[in-house]
Image (tube, rainbow, N blue to C red):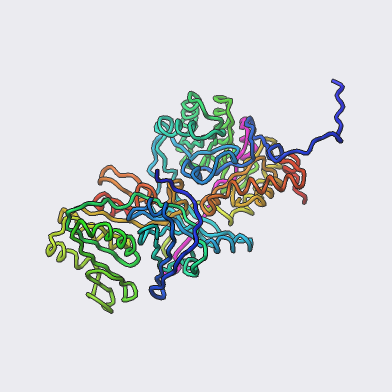
């Protein structure tokens, strides 16, 4: 009441204040997270997780998944193809074996990435996880086939995304982040459907369709043919879609796709991201995360800018 | 504890074997004490990483390279130029820096009092060199090595080339039964290309001989995170995709589901 803010007395901010960000209901010490499936406890042998604002685990399904036949990987001219097939031990084993270890080892917010084959299965998984302590949020992977809709991926229909998110948002107060596929005709519509269903944030982009062929033999480099394409080659795509979705929704965006350095991170923040994730970069540079945060912090300090001041302020 | 970590080490010595093959040596006592035969490192030429970064390009993944030799802190990597990663490694000289993640994987189980047959093909040779050094004092060891041509052949007891340019003419597995009988072999270790290992596994299974294979696979992380290197392991009815980098690279030959590879 009656407080006058005197700008002259404003103290010089420190890097940790400038790096602070928010993703929906989550307070993030840094805007940096990791893309599901590219970073796990083994990665923590390289550096302290304190440089991460949150940890996103590998996607879990209700039942264990064996995954796809090999070869599952191929490094292209510009980025990586993968066809892992969501190999994971299933929800029960995750809760029994992995979750306690995450709670023990991570002292940052844990976002559990889940995927389901029907709206009911997604809901069942959230209900089970709601009973577990130590989870800060969920990443809903909607790039998977919906058995109730002829196996077509959830993420391509705004109507189905709306129904799914509306049901899940009624089940949790935790962060509910919907991870969108770029392989759709209008990603902004899908993002709006997620927002209408009361998602608290959007993650984008999942991998882009990709393929590689041995020119001599004609053989696909990946056993299943079409794979997920990630890394440097998809950065312009991810940036454009981040910008597009940022124009369309008010909920915050966790952006990923070809981010390797602090400079890349800044581009995504200008485009509208509140947080960013490292994916393929973790494989190419095991120290990508601490290097990114160091560089980003130094830049923001030099410019005396905070994340919130530049977010979405791209000049066109 | 055997922690997988990222390190940079100077190359102490580079040995030229042929146009295609070379050995990089590093000295590190702690790493030497941690490594076992059959384990590997993910390695990369630091220069290739820095050059890419400085020119605004994206560096390539690490290459999984098995330990060729490890004695008194001298660790050797015998490498064949096959792709971009190994080509960059081939340009390294003494004093240049190597990036290393490892030692990784489970390595070969070591026994004593056995009549051992080693079977290698091409660049499957290096891990068996380190292995035979560990076996030789406590076992009877006979080593067969094969390759496409003379340039793929290295010191062993019996050489095979597909073009007949040196040693016996044909594929190395063609000589397995004869040697198994002659030396009354009761343990086999093998490393090489997948089709060769599948043939070797079929022979050992028919004859009921214990057999350990070291598999090669495309890798992204090399530490168990990405599941990109997984291969089908188990019995015919119950198998799972296990990671070559973590549960492997050494598996029991009978447990590899060769029919699915």
* x and y percentages locating residue A262 in the rendered image: 65, 50
Asked whether the viewer can see residue A211, the reply is no
* x and y percentages locating residue B151 in the rendered image: 34, 75
Hey, which residue is sitting farthest top in the picture? A1
* x and y percentages locating residue B252 in the rendered image: 26, 51
Q: Nearer the viewer, residue A252 or A95?
A: A95
- Magenta stretch in the rendered image: A189-217
Q: Please identify the quarter of the rendering in which residue A249 is found.
A: top right
Give the side of residue B261 with respect to residue A189, left or right: left
Give the side of residue B184 with respect to residue A131, left or right: left
Q: Quadrant of the N terminus of chain A?
A: top right
Task: Classify A163 as above or below A203.
Answer: above
Give the side of residue A182 with respect to residue A83, left or right: right
Tell me what residue is drawn at x 26 percent, y 78 percent.
B166
Task: Classify A250 as above or below A172.
Answer: below
Q: Nearer the viewer, residue B145 or B15?
A: B15
Task: Classify A126 as above or below B84.
Answer: above
Tell me what residue is drawn at x 69 percent, y 50 percent.
A267
Tell me how many marks there are: 0
Hey, which residue is sitting farthest bottom in the picture? B165
Q: Nearer the viewer, residue A235 or B247?
A: B247
* x and y percentages locating residue A315 in the rendered image: 77, 50
Task: Classify A32 as above or below B26.
Answer: above
Q: Nearer the viewer, residue B208 or B93?
A: B93
Give the side of residue A140 with respect to residue A240, left or right: left
Residue B199 magenta-drawn? no
Asked whether the viewer can see residue A288, the reply is yes
């Amino acid at each position: 009441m009656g407080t006058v803010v005197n700008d002259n007395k404003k103290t010089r901010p420190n890097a940790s204040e400038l790096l602070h960000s928010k993703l929906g209901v989550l307070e993030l010490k840094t805007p940096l997270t990791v893309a599901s499936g590219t970073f796990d406890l083994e990665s923590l042998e390289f550096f302290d997780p304190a440089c991460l604002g949150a940890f996103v685990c590998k996607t879990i399904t209700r039942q264990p998944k064996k995954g796809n036949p090999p070869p599952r990987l191929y490094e292209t001219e510009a980025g990586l193809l993968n066809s892992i097939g969501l190999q994971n031990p299933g929800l029960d084993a995750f809760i029994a074996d992995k979750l306690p270890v995450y709670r023990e080892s991570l002292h940052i917010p844990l976002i559990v990435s889940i995927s389901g084959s029907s709206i009911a299965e997604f809901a069942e998984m959230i209900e089970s996880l709601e009973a577990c302590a130590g989870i800060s949020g969920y990443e809903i992977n909607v790039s998977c086939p919906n058995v109730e809709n002829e196996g077509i991926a959830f993420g391509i229909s705004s109507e189905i995304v709306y129904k799914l998110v509306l049901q899940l948002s009624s089940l949790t107060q935790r962060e509910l982040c919907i991870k969108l596929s770029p392989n759709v005709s209008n990603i902004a519509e899908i993002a709006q459907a997620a927002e209408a269903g009361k998602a608290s944030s959007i993650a984008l982009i999942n991998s882009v369709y990709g393929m590689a062929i041995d020119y001599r033999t004609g053989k696909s480099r990946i056993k299943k043919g079409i794979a997920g394409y990630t890394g440097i080659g998809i950065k312009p795509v991810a940036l454009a879609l981040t910008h597009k979705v940022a124009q369309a929704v008010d909920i915050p965006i966790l952006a990923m796709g070809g981010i390797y350095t602090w400079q890349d991170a800044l581009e995504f923040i200008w485009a509208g991201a509140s947080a960013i994730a490292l994916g393929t970069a973790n494989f190419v540079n095991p120290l990508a995360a601490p290097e990114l945060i160091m560089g980003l912090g130094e830049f923001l300090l030099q410019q005396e800018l905070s994340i919130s001041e530049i977010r979405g302020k791209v000049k066109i | 504890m055997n922690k997988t970590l990222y390190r940079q080490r100077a190359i102490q010595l580079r040995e030229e074997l042929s146009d295609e093959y070379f050995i990089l040596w590093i000295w590190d006592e702690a790493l030497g004490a941690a490594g076992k035969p059959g384990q590997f490192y993910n390695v990369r030429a630091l220069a290739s990483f820095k050059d890419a970064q400085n020119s605004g390009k994206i560096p390539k993944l690490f290459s999984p390279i098995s330990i060729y030799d490890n004695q008194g802190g001298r660790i050797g990597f015998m490498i064949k130029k096959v792709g971009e990663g190994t080509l960059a490694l081939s340009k390294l000289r003494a004093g240049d820096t190597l990036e290393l993640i490892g030692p990784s994987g489970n390595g070969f189980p070591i026994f004593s009092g056995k009549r051992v047959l080693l079977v290698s093909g091409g660049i499957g040779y290096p891990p068996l060199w380190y292995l035979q050094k560990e076996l030789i004092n406590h076992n009877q060891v006979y080593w067969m090595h094969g390759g496409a041509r003379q340039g793929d052949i290295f010191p062993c007891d019996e050489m095979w080339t597909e073009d007949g340019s040196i040693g016996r003419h044909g594929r190395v597995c063609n000589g397995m039964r004869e040697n198994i009988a002659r030396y009354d072999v009761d343990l086999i270790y093998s490393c090489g290309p997948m089709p060769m290992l599948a043939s070797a596994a079929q022979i050992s299974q028919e004859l009921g001989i214990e057999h350990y294979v070291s598999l090669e696979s495309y890798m992204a992380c090399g530490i168990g995170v990405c599941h990109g290197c997984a291969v089908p392991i188990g019995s015919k009815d119950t198998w799972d995709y296990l990671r070559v980098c973590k549960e492997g690279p050494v598996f029991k030959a009978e447990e590899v589901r060769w029919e699915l590879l």
